Image (spheres, helix red, strand yellow):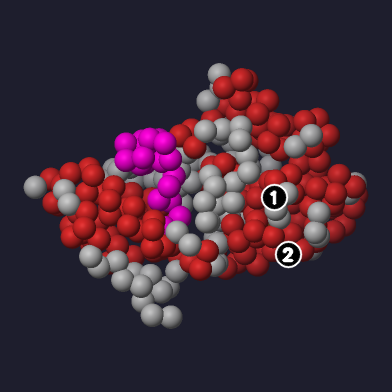
Amino acid sequence: MTQPSTCGYGGSAGGGYSGLSLWLEDLYARFNHREYVRPDPVELLYDFEDVREREIVALVAAALAYGRAALIMKNAGRIVDIMGTSPRDFVLNSSDEDLASMFRSFRHRFTSGEDVAALVSGIRRALYLYGSLENCFREGRKGGRASTNEALAFFRKVLCAGLLRSGNAMLPDPAGKSACKRLYLFLKWMVRSDEVDPGGWTCLDLSRLMIPLDTHMFSIARSFGMTSRKNANYGAVLEVTRAFAALRPDDPLRYDFVLTRFGIRQDLDKKKLLAEGALIQGGDRG
């Protein structure tokens, strides 16, 4: 594949904060397309038009979203294949014994088949109690009075309620210092709706989403001066989310996909991206 060029964005962007905004918007127009998705696990969601099926696939795929993208796709795809054409029916009709047997041999880095079985069991509990994962999250929002993290903490508590230990390693605790990348990624997929993010949930406004801060976005955000933190922790999540919200208050995660492509895909040049970003910001300061 021919190396897509980002040349010319700096010249069209101008100066000031609007300069960075226009440059990012140009990137969005060029790269926010499904042809640039692979090897992103969001691809697994595209086969499920029913939101009540899609939300289950999204949670499972997001919960495995650590490590190399190709390995995530492979292992999340294995689980989706086991769940079949109706993940919802699979979840509702599989006993804990069934799940333990079906996922016994599964392994994704530090995630065991036992962890996956526990997650699917937790999803089943949420469906029985609230009818859907969205309704479970909506309950945690307390009519809009709760923050995104508070709603996620409630959501996780329901999913982990049947576990002997305090939680499932696949689901980070929003009440702690974790960057919670996987849960924020799940929300992004289910709340945003464009060519890449399939969306479907209506229980949360785009402006309330938090950045799923992986290593690629963290290094880009540091280069752009959006955070000076050395670790991708919750404090960094807040700083980076606020920086993007200053550019797009209505949709702070709008540029997440296109920017992270430059850390994931070999046909896109991250060094060139960072150089252009520095040039744009140099013009801003000038």
Near-viewer residue (144 or 83): 144
Q: Which residue is mark 2?
A: 78
Q: Nearer the viewer, residue 25 or 39?
A: 25
Secondary structure beneath disc 2? helix
Magenta range is 238-258
Number of numbered discs visible in the structure rendering: 2
**Image side of residue 198 versus residue 240, left or right:** right
In this figure, which residue is indicated by the disc labeled 1?
A: 54
Tell me the amino acid under the disc marked 1: Arg
Residue in the foreground of this view, choosing between 100 and 44: 44
**Residue 131, placed above or below residue 218:** above
Calculate the distance from the C-alpha at mark 2 to the C-alpha at mark 1: 16 Å
Q: In the rendering, at what x and y percent does residue 249 appear?
A: 38, 35
Mark in front: 2 vs 1: 1
- The answer to whether one can see residue 237 in this image is no
Q: How busy is the neighbourhood of tag 1: few (under 14 within 10 Å), some, or many (20 plus)?
A: many
Q: Main secondary structure of the magenta part?
A: helix
Q: Residue 34 got which mark?
A: none
Helix, strand or loop under label 1? helix
Q: Measured from the top left, where is residue 265 in percent x and y? A: 45, 69
Q: Is residue 271 left or right of residue 58?
A: left
Of the numbered discs 2 and 1, the one sitting upstream in the chain is 1
Image point (44%, 45%), residue name: 253
Disc 2 residue type? Arg
Is residue 15 at all visible to an observer of this figure? yes
Picture quadrant where residue 190 is located: top right
